[in-house]
Image (cartoon, rainbow, N blue to C red):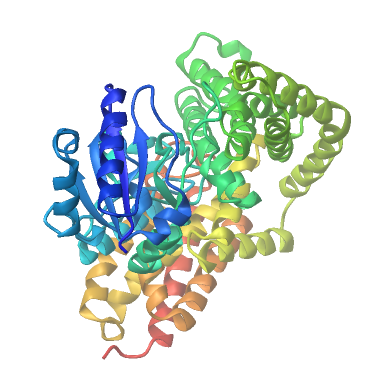
Amino acid sequence: MTQVLAVVGGGAQGLHAVLAGEALRKAAQRRRQAVEVELRGKGVGGHPLSAAAIAGADTVLLIGEGDLGEGRFGAMRRARIRIEDVLTDAHAVLDRVLSGEAGAAPATASRTIVAVTSCPTGIAHTFMAAEGIQAAAQALGYAVRVETQGSVGAHDALTPEEIAAADLVLIAADTGVDRSRFAGKLVYATNTKAAIRDGKGLIATAFDAAQVQGGAAAAGEPARPAAAEAKAGAYKHLMTGVSFMLPFVVAGGLLIALAFALGGIDAMKPEHAGTLGFALGEIGAKAAFALIVPALAGYIAYSIADRPGIAPGMIGGMLAANLQAGFLGGIAAGFIAGYATSFLNRHIRLHRNLEGLKPVLILPLLATAISGLLMIYVVGVPVAAILAALTEWLKGMQGTSAVLLGLVLGGMMAIDMGGPVNKAAYASSAALIASGITAPMAAVMIGGMTPPLGIALATRLFPARFSKPEREAGGAAAVLGAAFITEGAIPFAAADPLRVIPAMVAGSALAGALALSLGVELKVPHGGLFVLPIPNAVTNLPGALIALVAGTLTTGLLVGLLKKRAA
């Protein structure tokens, strides 16, 4: 016998849902038809459809209005019914549904997907993942809307109406994404690479493995963040903190550079107080840079414990900065605060009328006390000592040590082009700027620009080694490389990894080694060629250009020599 499910939504008229549900049950009993009914509406509810009932049914009746939790039913046949029709003649409704005349259709004919993509910098991987999901959904005949998130916020933000109408919420992110707005929807979370490499496979997996997103535990308490629910590791939490930290580094670094450009190298000394250069230096150094470590720590904690973790994390980060523990102390403070908040949230149980106090009073107070005391008495001093030793070593680099560090950092930028190795080198170098160490950032940015620029050069010097689409894509790779978007080389590396990746690593390693051996320093963590003309943003600009040209030539020539002639 066919198993039929029904979800009845009465909206503000909850009584209508009760009456319609009862009429449907009686009609089904008289026909000896198995039916499971779930009521939704103001003042009603209960007996939600079980997972076993959903798995054993092949048809669902979506009756009335409001959020009917449609995303739970996957590829099941659906019939949309007006609540008035059920109240008028429930027998006729069942007749039409069971005979296939009620507009029931496989969900595959009208599946709708909403998606969120995000990476730490919010640039290449974010949009490449969005394009992968859009192209795959269109090829499969699904409607799709994608929201992209980055350091500057969300673009093309999903509306509540679009989320309510979606069959699936797909999150492809390398950072934590707040899922509280997706409560009651089928949600599947993964990383950006899955969307870039195989969008169709990802969508199929998502429909099979998605789970219903729970709502807030109590009024005012947000749902668990995506990173925590997906049981993401430390890397994802760290990258979330880095993504929120970067705007502070960029703004502070550029403002300090402008201060020096307007007021000279002594612009920030007290005797220049009142000048524009001094004011810009104060904003950059004593405001933007002062917030780098608290922002890093606060949003690491946010990734782990959601909003209740922000205050303990930021306060722990401020303590790290005051204790001279720098970004290393900020990372420690973020993880301590995040996991302390998460632990307390799981183990503190209050009456439901008092649950609203947890996120605004109890969790921030207790977690801040715990993380603050640990930073002061346990973690802060030894981490500060480690950072001081690291700082002295980096500032004293010369000769072989500088070349070796440059080789390592530059090579790391080309190994996976935006993956974990690339981001590890980038995040650590960007964070060191807050401690006044700007040389590693030069090796990282120049080494990261080299792969797409070298590929673009190879398509011009060795056109026979590339197909026509690849030659045309070379121009785009050049633009991306100039903007320090290493991911522009990914399509070429994916097509021939054994030849292209070693060539890129060699060029980037050479560029990084030359940059550090020539004393190049960079005060801002992004921008590529577009920040080079800014006065004082780069120390030893000729050396930076020499390193970039040498690395680009090396990659271009090696790619041309190693690749086979295109078919």
Name the outermost residue toward the front.
Answer: 30
Between residue 263 and residue 327, name the one nearer to us.
Answer: 327
Image vertical order of residue 535 relative to residue 555, above or below: above
Say which of 558 and 23 sits in front.
23
Residue extending farthest to the left is 101
Q: Position of residue 181 (x, y in %)?
A: 41, 34
- Is 158 left or right of 382, judged from the image as shown? left
Res 361 → quadrant: top right
The quadrant the N terminus occupies is bottom left
How many badges with numbers are in the image?
0
**What residue lies at 77% left-to-right and 29% top-to-bottom?**
371
Nearer to us in this view, 81 or 358: 81
Residue 157: in sight, yes or no? no
- Where residue 147 sits in the image (x, y, percent)? 32, 43
Q: Is residue 179 above or below residue 477?
A: above
Look at the image and tell me whether residue 278 can be seen: yes
Q: Position of residue 132 (x, y in %)?
A: 32, 61
Q: Residue at x 86, y 33 (%)?
A: 381
Is the C terminus in the top left, top right, bottom left or bottom right quadrant?
bottom left
Give 548 or 243, whichever is nearer the viewer: 243
**Which of the 4 image quarters holds residue 319?**
top right
Q: Is residue 301 left or right of residue 487?
A: right
State the residue lying farthest toward the top: 274
Q: How far across and down, in percent of the image, does residue 347 sit?
A: 73, 32
